[in-house]
């Protein structure tokens, strides 16, 4: 039976994480584009360069991208807008994927699926022409950013009754990042490393 993409992705993060990509080493691969990350991950193959349009890339999408074996992900929307603590970009970086933040870069207009591209630093090249000049995001910077976001988050909404907790994650009525899964499924407590634990589908 095929292993679900997400289960395979979680397996990636057990034990020692892969070495981070070296920014001075160019990455060559075929560009794969889709503004719907969920659809894109179904056709990515190892070595591809994923081009996405996904503001606040969530943990689930990041795990699926990492499990596909992509070498780099270029996002034409901000990986993290700062609206809430967002672990997705850090998950990808820790899996050894190079992240290029390139908001508003015209890659969906300039590139076709399968075009050969080269990533050097934060730049995306095709046939020697620079198509986008973004910024590479490394794991240490993303970890600091996430920590800062976690410290300043302010919650709204009403505290749910402990006698009658809502279905799914008990926190979902107050959660600014709740997704459909949060309303149905209670998350398990998981070890996130570095002394952190969380019961959250997206943490
Ligand atoms: S699992 Fe709970 S805390 Fe995590 S995103 Fe969903 S509602 Fe928010």
Image (tube, grey):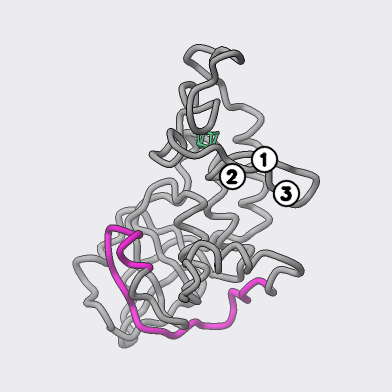
Q: CA distance from mark 1 to mark 2?
A: 7 Å
Q: Earlier in the sequence, mark 1 or mark 2?
A: 1
Task: Determine whether the beta carbon of the residue marked 2 sits less than 8 angstroms from the nearest atom of ligand 1.
Answer: yes
Mark 1 closeness class: few <14, some 14–19, many ≥20 residues within 10 Å: few
Task: Label 2, secondary structure: give it.
Answer: loop
Give, as a single range, the part of the protein colored magenta: 20-41
Q: Nearer the viewer, residue 44 or 136?
A: 44
Quadrant of res 125? bottom left
Judge left or right: residue 146 versus residue 75: right
Residue 203, numbered circle: 2
Give the labeled residue for mark 1. 198
Measure how far apart labels 2 and 3 are at the Cα level.
Answer: 10 Å
Q: Which one is nearer the viewer's eye here, 32 or 105?
A: 32
Near mark 2 (Cα within 10 A), the count class, few <14, some 14-19 or many ≥20, is: some
Describe residue 143's horizontal placement relative to residue 39 as left or right.
right
Q: Are marks 1 and 2 in contact (CB under 8 Å)?
A: yes
85 horizontally vs 77: left or right: right
Mark nearer the N terminus (2 vs 3): 3
| Near-viewer residue (101 or 31) | 31
Q: Residue at x 55, y 26 (%)?
A: 170
Mark 1 vs mark 3, CA separation in Å: 7 Å
| Residue 109 location (% of width, % of height) | 19, 66
Is tag 1's residue or tag 3's residue first in the polypeptide sequence? 3
Residue 117 occupies quadrant = bottom left
- Residue linked to disc 3: 191
The location of residue 54, given as percent across then percent down, is 36, 52
């Amino acid at each position: 039976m095929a292993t679900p993409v997400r289960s395979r992705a979680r397996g990636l993060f057990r034990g020692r994480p892969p070495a981070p990509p070296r920014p001075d080493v160019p990455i060559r691969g075929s560009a794969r584009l889709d503004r719907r990350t969920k659809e894109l991950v179904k056709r990515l193959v190892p070595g591809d360069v994923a081009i996405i349009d996904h503001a606040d890339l969530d943990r689930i999408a990041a795990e699926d991208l990492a499990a596909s074996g992509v070498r780099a992900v270029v996002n034409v929307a901000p990986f993290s807008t700062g609206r809430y603590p967002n672990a997705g970009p850090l998950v990808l970086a820790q899996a050894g994927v190079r992240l290029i933040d390139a908001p508003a870069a015209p890659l969906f207009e300039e590139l076709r699926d399968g075009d050969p591209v080269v990533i050097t630093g934060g730049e995306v090249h095709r046939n020697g022409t620079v198509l986008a000049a973004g910024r590479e995001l490394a794991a240490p910077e993303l970890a600091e950013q996430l920590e800062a976001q976690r410290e300043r988050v302010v919650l709204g909404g009403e505290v749910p009754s402990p006698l009658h907790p809502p279905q799914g994650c008990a926190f979902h009525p107050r959660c600014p990042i709740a997704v459909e899964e949060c309303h149905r499924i209670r998350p398990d407590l998981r070890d996130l490393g570095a002394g952190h634990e969380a019961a959250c589908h997206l943490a």
